[in-house]
Amino acid sequence: MEQKLHTPEGVRDIYGTECRKKLAVQEKLHELLHLYGYHDIQTPTFEYFDVFRKEIGTISSRELYQFFDREGNTLALRPDITPSIARAAATLFEEEDCPIRLCYVGNTFINHSSYQGRLKENTQLGAELIGVDSIEADAEMLAMVVDGLKRAGLKEFQVNIGHVNFIRGLMEASGLSEEVTEELFTLIANRNYFGVEEILDNQGVRDDVKEAFGALPELVGGAEVLSDAARLAPTPGAKAAIARLLKIYQVLMHYGVEKHITFDLSMSGSYMYYTGIIFRAYTYGTGDAVVRGGRYDHLLEKFGKNTPSIGFAMIVDELASALSRQKISVETKQSNLIVCTEKTLKWAISLAGEFREKGRSIELLKREPSEDKEKYMEYGKRTQAVSMLYLQEDGTVELVNFRTGKEKKVDYKKERVTE
């Protein structure tokens, strides 16, 4: 017996109701980006390796899916769509001096070491605002994230905001080597503040800087934590970062989204290309962020255009999973069934056409005379169809409403069934 193939580790098939719900969420979010004036762009699924090289600051090369073309060039599946858009924008909009608003939907691929539930292929939907470095641009991005998560159906979620120049200011003031600094970043990302304290003690870091590092676990919360952060900021760059966060918050209040905003000054960002604010959105029912984003003012320089930018990516799979686990209903366009025989096929095709012209989804099923209605009743329930029209050869129709469970018989000659 031939062995059936299954999917590799870290990828999966999505189908049926789950697929419908994921696509419905995706469509709703995509529409929101258009409402904010963002225009679609599609970039290749794979690029030259250099687009994602270490200097760009995405992920380590060992986590890239790499392969070769016929000419021997090294290619890579995209682990992150932002560098691809930066590469495209630097060329396509080289002379543009007004803000460029771009949005996208696409899959990303990261060959990380797997653990339960973590996918290596994810669908991301995101937006990039290129060509403007302003408080208002930062606030617009954050407001879009909140607006999008609310439109998806979430009620309980928080967008955590930090600024890379605050945490980097602490590292700069510590005077530690690059190797030790990298270790500190890792410890802070893992919330291992005992390890941070031990390193600072062993390295003889001055007391005011140690105090700032020691306060990081407390610098999480509403706008009130910004005053403490401003007091502890050891460098001009760190102080400027806090001042900017405060101004962003004031604009966010105009949007009315402040209840979903949390500041976390320990955030350093998962990508090294971030240069300003960074943010992640979290909700119940998922172990990872449903949105990641930040400012990357020097990324386009790597591709030849010197211009500031900010963007975010919503991880659609994580968001759909959270909605499911929170038992939040997602409206989907469900089908209706028309079941016919050979003799009623012409009639069934005509009916289906009338329904489709009215925007209703119709699945046409032809049955054998020996098959009974129960088979199609079970199929309709299994696929979560809305209704079934079971055509009889005497010109009558048995109408089944799967939502209410009600059935009735209609004489097609006397009563139209497409109303």
Image (cartoon, helix red, strand yellow):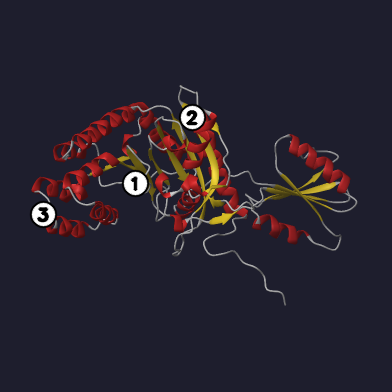
Q: Residue at 10% of width from left, 45% of height from top?
A: 208
Residue 204: assigned label: 3
Q: Position of residue 157 (x, y in %)?
A: 37, 45
Residue 101: assigned label: 2
Q: Quadrant of the C terminus?
A: top right
Q: Position of residue 15 (x, y in %)?
A: 62, 55
Residue extending furthest right? 343
Front tag of 3 and 1: 3
Foreground pick, 222 / 396 = 222
Asked if the residue at tag 1 contacts the one at tag 3, i.e. Cβ–Cβ closer than 8 Å, the answer is no
Amino acid type of disc 1? Gly
Residue extending furthest bottom? 1
Q: Where, by quadrant of the figure, is residue 202 drawn?
A: bottom left
- The residue under label 1 is 269
Q: Position of residue 70 (x, y in %)?
A: 64, 53
Asked if the residue at tag 2 contacts the one at tag 3, i.e. Cβ–Cβ closer than 8 Å, the answer is no
Front tag of 3 and 2: 3
Mark 2 neighbour density, 10 Å: few (under 14) some (14–19) many (20 or more): many
User: Can the viewer see residue 157?
Assistant: no
Identify the mark nearer the N-term, 3 or 2: 2
Q: Would residue 386 appear left or right of 97 to someone viewing this image? A: right
Foreground pick, 330 / 92 = 92
Q: Secondary structure at mark 2?
A: strand
Q: Position of residue 9 (x, y in %)?
A: 53, 64
Quote the CA–CA distance across marks 3 and 2. Answer: 47 Å
Q: Where, by quadrant of the figure, is residue 244 drawn?
A: top left
Compared with 128, 59 (above or below) is: below
Quote the CA–CA distance across marks 1 and 2. Answer: 23 Å
Q: Would residue 367 appear left or right of 246 to someone viewing this image? A: right
